[in-house]
Image (cartoon, grey):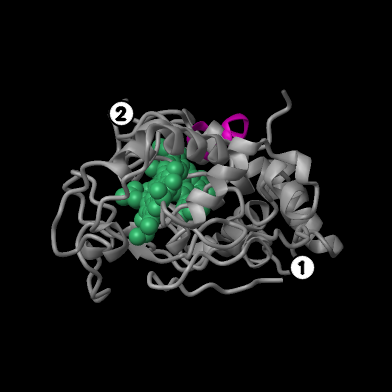
Amino acid sequence: MTVSYTPDTTAQTPDLATLKRIFARPTLTSPASDPDAKARLALGARLFRDRLLSRNQSMSCATCHNPNRAFTDGRPRARGNDGTPLDRNTPTLYDVRYGNSFFWDGRASTLEDQARVPLEHPRELNLPLTDAVTRLAAQKYYRRTFDRAFSMRPSITSETVLQSLATYERSLNSPNTRFDSWVSGTTTALSKSEATGFRIFSGKGRCIACHGGWRFTDDKFHDTGLPSTDLGRGAIPGSNAAPHTFKTPSLRQLTQTAPYMHDGSLPTLEAVVDHYNGTRIQRPSLASELKNALGLTPNERRALVAFLKTLSFSSR
Ligand code: HEC
Ligand code: HEC
């Protein structure tokens, strides 16, 4: 169930029952419902971790999208195969199945199209897809597994490699969290301060204007006033997007995905909240919700951070 929310800055904050409906997590399924998809998923999981897919066999998708860090790498910006930083921070892959555009600037519209980019990028895996197909076809394991997962012959093609990776990515549902228990009725799942933080998120803090819904994103692009010179979606020909706009990221599993923002410039959640509460670069593209100061007190900022942490599963 998805409840859409159109932010209206003149309206009062919705009541708690309405808010809970906006953020209720649906029952998530896995793409592996039929045997074919199951075989593709297993194949994709293997390809995702296989360094064979990089020219000099030095990295895989999992090098940057580490499953133990919610599929991120802990670096401000990803490290390229030459050891120097790429342009942007590595985003989580949780719940990508439910997104409608990929990359911080949304320049890929399917996961299959997206996967081709890091595979062939000279500073990432640096392996043209046709070469990847040749390499995989030379291995008995992959010949057998692709034959099982796909009916066409030959079964190892550019398309089936991308499809396998994408099928695996579509299985990466974020874990259930304390916030989800609270929304579904367990009132003791959040402390008083965490629940206060949620009210600030949905009210005075105006975070809900862009981070509404169970994935905490509107899937749109905004300028949040960071000093970075990256034009984001504004640099994409034909997008007509304003400069400095980036896709609103999900806020799930934040405790594992620091540092934050497209440039990894904010090391902690406290720094993120201080950014929204403090100096945003005032320029014409700055999102209208962020033009005026929030005026959050130190206690309110602490409560907001405490709430953000409840969107992560931790085994503590
Ligand atoms: C060198 C590090 C690195 C490697 C290797 C890498 N990625 Fe990424 N990935 C990134 C970075 C950085 C971004 C964001 C780039 C941007 O937005 O311009 C990204 C973005 C993505 C996204 C978009 C997520 C979103 O929410 O928009 C997906 C999906 C993805 N990568 C999958 C893959 C797959 C599949 C592979 C292997 C074929 C891979 N990545 C290899 C660093 C890496
Ligand atoms: C106008 C839309 C908008 C509003 C309002 C907004 N955000 Fe964001 N948020 C974004 C966008 C867009 C990004 C990515 C910005 C970038 O990297 O340039 C982001 C990034 C973040 C991140 C970093 C996530 C990551 O994985 O890097 C956090 C945490 C966050 N926002 C929390 C909040 C909180 C808390 C509030 C309220 C005080 C808030 N946001 C208000 C749009 C918004």
Residue at left offset 57%, top offset 31%:
69
The label number, if any, that marks residue 82 in the structure image? 2
Q: Which residues are magenta?
A: 61-70
Taking the image as shown, residue 223 lies to the left or right of residue 73, namely left
What x and y, as percent, mark residue 67? 62, 34
Residue at left offset 25%, top offset 41%:
278
Taking the image as shown, residue 238 lies to the left or right of residue 172, namely left
Pick the front one: 23 or 252: 23
Q: Does the magenta segment cover residue 312?
A: no
Quarter of the rendering containing residue 209: bottom left
Taking the image as shown, residue 152 lies to the left or right of residue 38, namely left
Where the N terminus falls, by quadrant?
Answer: bottom right
Q: Does the magenta segment cover residue 66?
A: yes
Quarter of the rendering containing residue 104: bottom left
260 over 246 or under it: above or below: above
**Label 1 Cα crowd, 10 Å radius (few <14 / some 14-19 / many 20+):** few
Pick the front one: 81 or 295: 295
Pick the front one: 110 or 256: 256
What x and y, as percent, mark residue 202? 51, 56
Predominant secondary structure in magenta? helix
Tag in front: 2 or 1: 2
Quarter of the rendering containing residue 161: bottom right
Which amino acid lies under the numbered mark 1 shown in the image of this protein? Answer: Ser
The answer to whether residue 292 of the structure is visible from this angle is: yes
Which amino acid lies under the numbered mark 2 shown in the image of this protein? Answer: Asp
Q: Residue furthest left?
A: 283
What x and y, as percent, mark residue 119? 45, 48
Query: Which residue corresponds to mark 1?
Result: 151
Q: Is mark 2 within 8 Å of ligand 1?
A: no
